[in-house]
Amino acid sequence: MKKKKEFNNFSIAKTLKNDKNQKLWRKQRKKRGFDDTELWNLHYTYYEFMIPRLEAFKNITMSYPSYETSESYEEKLNFIINSFKLRYELYDKSSVDFEEEKIINENAKKAAVLLGELWFDLWS
């Protein structure tokens, strides 16, 4: 019987001090590589994972899809990274102008669609 391939799970969770669930979360991280705290705002967990990797990818990649120029590809990667960063930073802002938040959210949605379009071409 073919062995099921396991994903390389690892936690990027932050420790919440003085929380009674630390023991449970430790067990979850040991068993599945992440704990429930990473699921509370899953899109923020994705931002924390993806932004630094997209930045590093952009800096090391020497290739681009055949239907793009190197300039257009870099421009799209920059848009994705910057849009995701601005959306991620909304989490810590106490007050944001409604119109500014609307624009940030619209750009993050466009960036997610754009990332989906480039998904299978993210190789270096």
Image: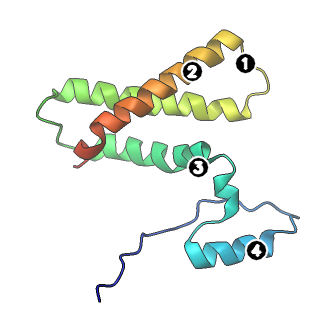
Horizontal side, residue 34 vs residue 93: left or right: left
Q: Disc 4 residue type?
A: Leu
Task: From the image, tell me which residue sits under label 4.
Answer: 24
SS state under label 1: loop
SS state under label 3: helix
Alpha-carbon span between mark 3 and mark 2 = 18 Å
Alpha-carbon span between mark 3 and mark 1 = 21 Å
Residue at x-position 60% and y-position 48%: 42
Q: Disc 1 residue type?
A: Val
Task: From the image, tell me which residue sits under label 3.
Answer: 45
Using the image, determine if residue 62 lies above or below residue 26. above
Residue extending farthest top: 99
Identify the mark nearer the N-term, 3 or 1.
3
Q: Disc 2 residue type?
A: Ile
Alpha-carbon span between mark 1 and mark 4 = 35 Å
Dot 1: few (<14), some (14–19), or many (≥20) neighbours within 10 Å?
few
Label 2 close to label 1 by CB (< 8 Å)? yes
